[in-house]
Amino acid sequence: MVAESSNMRKIWGYCPVDYRTWPSRAVPQVQKIVLHADYATNCMQVILSNRNGVMPLALTAMMISCRHHELIKWSQPLCVNNRSDITLGLDDEILSDPVYGTVSYADDIEISLTLPYTTYLSSGVVTYSRLGLTIEQTELITQQRISQRQQFIMVRQNPRMTYFFGIVGLMMRVTEPADIISVFGDSIVQQGFFTNHLRHQLHNNTPNFYSVINCGIGGNRVLFDTDPSMDQWYRHGIAGRKRFASDLFSCSKPDTVVVLHGINDLIQQTIHPGEEENVTEVIRGLKSYAAACTDRGTRAFIGTLLPLGRSQFFSQAVESKRTELNRWIRSQQVFTGVIDFDQVMKDKEQPEMLRHDADSGDGLHPSDAGGRQMAIIAQQTLYSLNERS
């Protein structure tokens, strides 16, 4: 696990997914990632990861560049212990050496690395939204663009996904006042429509102040680890109550945490008839999140759970539990505030269902337009608190 460096803060990142059940045979290639800087800085570090790997991950010719409107301002080798060619062992997660160079909040950061050997990849990041994020993978020998669907099993299983490997976070020296926001949850967070729109809106409206980190894992639950009958590894992660502190605070401390978690606990009785996950126990788990944030002096917001009436997981019993949990969320006093996603995302005529214009098509997950609506209400809530502070 990486350790926080002096004066450095994590400003962008994702939780790597455990794909040991579905390892992908990746050909030698060059991977290039471009993301918005968000902050002005003169020092950066990249978090490199092979967490959940099934074989060592060799990375060579690593480079980091600063771009402004497609113009390269500067480019440097990205090194670990002064070497730009490294091998990450199984479950290794490390910080690069500091990279010094002037970056404006309006710039883009480009990170390039080479996978020199055919490698089975089982660790990496999955996102559905590419707002503010460009990913390009090119075969090393032919220089042809790689089809993600052909090479990566997880994308073949779900073509809406985009996958990248080796890189899971970016740290910057932040000297001005800032609000680093980590969003914790399940696939609704992981898919990135909400988090990327929130990051984009905050950056446009209040540049050089906010950033958003994605700590979602698809299928993740508050109370229990991945069901071993569905996956012998941990594609859906360990229980939120186990991973909350380590995923949010092990690298650097966010100023604000937004929690949107619990729907996968409630739908278990639909997936596994006979399993009854008590709302009271889910509440106890969510309270542990608030306590962890309070102990560390971090503000914590909790979001109401979205409707799922058109989903295959819907039942009246699940809806009763969601209503009960949302009632507690709206009235509780342990979190700093509440973001009422349910209120803005529900169909006005059928409140147990997502609005059609916000539904990705499965009745459970928001579309890109839905993610934008979630970001609007989250931004309004965060701005309201900052105005009162």
Image (cartoon, rainbow, N blue to C red):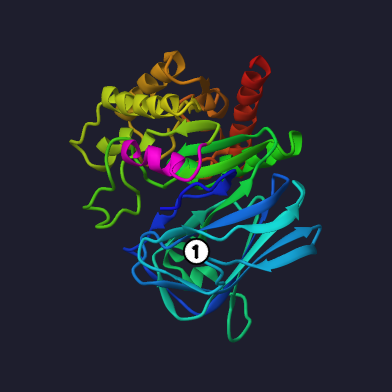
The amino acid pointed to by label 1 is: Gly
| Residue 79: image location, x then y, percent | 57, 67
The answer to which image quadrant residue 310 occupies is top left
Q: Is residue 329 magenta?
A: no
Residue that carries the numbered disc 1 in the rendered image: 166
For this view, does 28 lie left or right of residue 44?
left
Main secondary structure along the magenta-highlighted residues: helix
Q: Is residue 251 magenta?
A: yes
Q: Label 1's element? A: loop
Residue drawn at x 48%, y 41% as measured from the top left = 188
The magenta stretch is 240-253
Image height check: is 110 above or below 25? above
Say which of 140 and 209 sits in front: 209
Total numbered labels placed on residues in the image: 1
| Residue 195: image location, x then y, percent | 57, 41
For this view, does 362 lie left or right of residue 137?
left
For this view, does 52 lie left or right of residue 303?
left
Residue drawn at x 59%, y 43% as measured from the top left = 7
Image height check: is 270 above or below 335? below
| Residue 381: image location, x then y, percent | 61, 23
Question: Which residue sits furthest left?
Answer: 274
